[in-house]
Amino acid sequence: MVEPILRIENLYKNFGDVEVLKGVSLTVEEGEVVVIIGPSGTGKSTLLRCINYLTVPDSGDIYFEGRKIEYKQDNLSIVRQKIGMVFQEFNLFNHLTALQNVAIGPSKVKKINKTKALELAEKELLRVGLQDKADHYPAELSGGQKQRVAIARALAMDPKILLFDEPTSALDPELTGEVLMVMKDLALDGMTMMVVSHEMGFAREVSDKIIFLEGGVVSEMGSPEKIFNNPDKERTLEFVSKITRLGPIDSSRGGSDI
Amino acid sequence: MGLNGKAGEVFKSIPYILQGLEVTLKVTILALIIGAALGLILALMRVYGGGFCSRISVFYSRIIRSLPLIVILFGLYYLGADILDLSAYTAVILALSVHTAAYQSEIFRGAIQSISIGQMEAALALGMSKFQCIFSIILPQALRRAIPYWSNEAAIVLKDSSLAYVLGIAELLRRGEYVSARTTMPLLTYTIVGVIYFILTFVLSRGLFFVERKLSIPE
């Protein structure tokens, strides 16, 4: 049996008195696209942030490429280099151009020489279709363009898995399409992805597995067909139909928000 | 000798007053450099240093900011004279440095804290060490934001350097005082000294404003 690229066991996280994660367990296979859905405040982002230890879980184990991450002993930098992250608020480095934003990871972290890092960055910008914006500063880009640069920045580190924390939630509706398109291309290229999102069209069309997180636990998990059409739990059906009513999910129109 | 004659004396003494420029500028520039280095270290201790370092930084800033500069100056000079054998000149530079460092630490702290936490998180997520995050991502942005406030502090240090006169250092103000005493024309003399300080401050502020614009990034 092939070891899953990511295995989370019994993850707990409290913020003060608030229990956010109450024993989350899940696995992600290599090449899989997993979409995490669930009501707000249910710990979706926290779960994602625990994976690269931007948030330190209280207990539970995370195995990455078959090896348990030891928060206290491991060099987190090495783990994080292999786990890319894309944030809701983009978090591009404001003092750097698009190209420099993408190049800084390889050059500072991997110590690749600067010219090579810039060449690599150009390639990654091309991949997200923004080669002509290389010299623009983040403030000069639209939200969708910023997020695509942020994806290129994560890709430049050549990660084994990419985490997307609500990548389109801060975008105007007409800008989400370009970002989802880039994500879809990545999925087709075989990138392992974990996506927290309310983009049901994307979840339905691109994902291999949907995880319904509620109340800090995995309430249900399964293929998109199962979650959308025939979930085990009444509550899953209720949530999915509530969310999908808010946006277009007609699979023939799936492209409208992809 | 009439009024014109006395006024003429004052004007003829301008080159003498201007000889104090060198001391004033040296004291100001050295104090600003040492103060900036110390202030930056204090700010980093405050924001990233954790409990103990952070408390030391807060303590330093509170104590120094609650003392009049002249008390720090005399303290260093007389204490220094007994123990360290500081010259008046060194005592002035140190006192100004110690004093401005407290204010600059607050300027830098505010600027660092104004950078969104997401910048640090994105850098960490790439695999950067905290040190790399601070020096490659946070400070380049924070220091740019600090320039207008730092420029204000630089003008204050320039004018505070006039306190060196109490230790008998012949900087601008002290020389002005000599001229005033000799010519019995205090109003005119101190007006001239004031104009010199005004020009210095103006040039300094414009210069830093130029730097600010030159380094600005689209926001």
Image: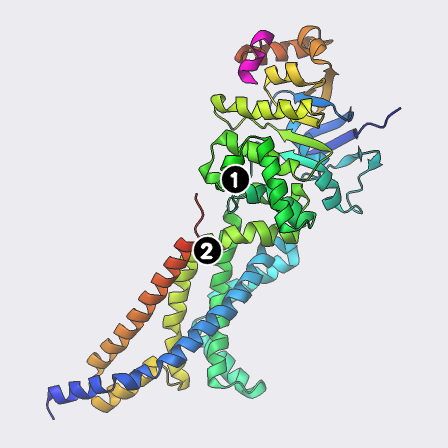
Q: Return the mark for residue A134.
A: 1
Amino acid type, residue under disc 2 in the picture:
Ala
Mark 1–mark 2 Cα distance, whole angstroms, equals: 27 Å
In magenta, the rendered stretch is: A250-258
SS for callout 2:
helix
* Total residue callouts: 2
Q: Are marks 1 and 2 on the same chain?
A: no
Q: Main secondary structure of the magenta part?
A: helix
Q: In which chain is the residue bearing label 1?
A: A
Provide residue B152's location: percent of width, then percent of height. 39, 61
Q: Is residue B191 above or below residue A218?
A: below
Quarter of the picture containing the N terminus of chain B is bottom left
Farthest residue in the left direction? B2
10 Å crowding of disc 1: few (<14), some (14-19), many (20+): some
10 Å crowding of disc 2: few (<14), some (14-19), many (20+): some
Farthest residue in the right direction? A1
Name which residue lies at 75% across and 44% down: A78
Q: In which chain is the residue bearing label 2?
A: B
Provide residue A162's location: percent of width, then percent of height. 68, 31
Q: Is residue A240 above or below residue A121?
A: above
Amino acid type, residue under disc 1 in the picture:
Ala
In the rendered structure, does residue A174 fall within the stretch colored magenta? no
Instruction: Name the image quarter holding residue A89.
Output: top right
Q: Nearer the viewer, residue B169 or B64?
A: B169
Report which residue position mark 2 lands on: B146
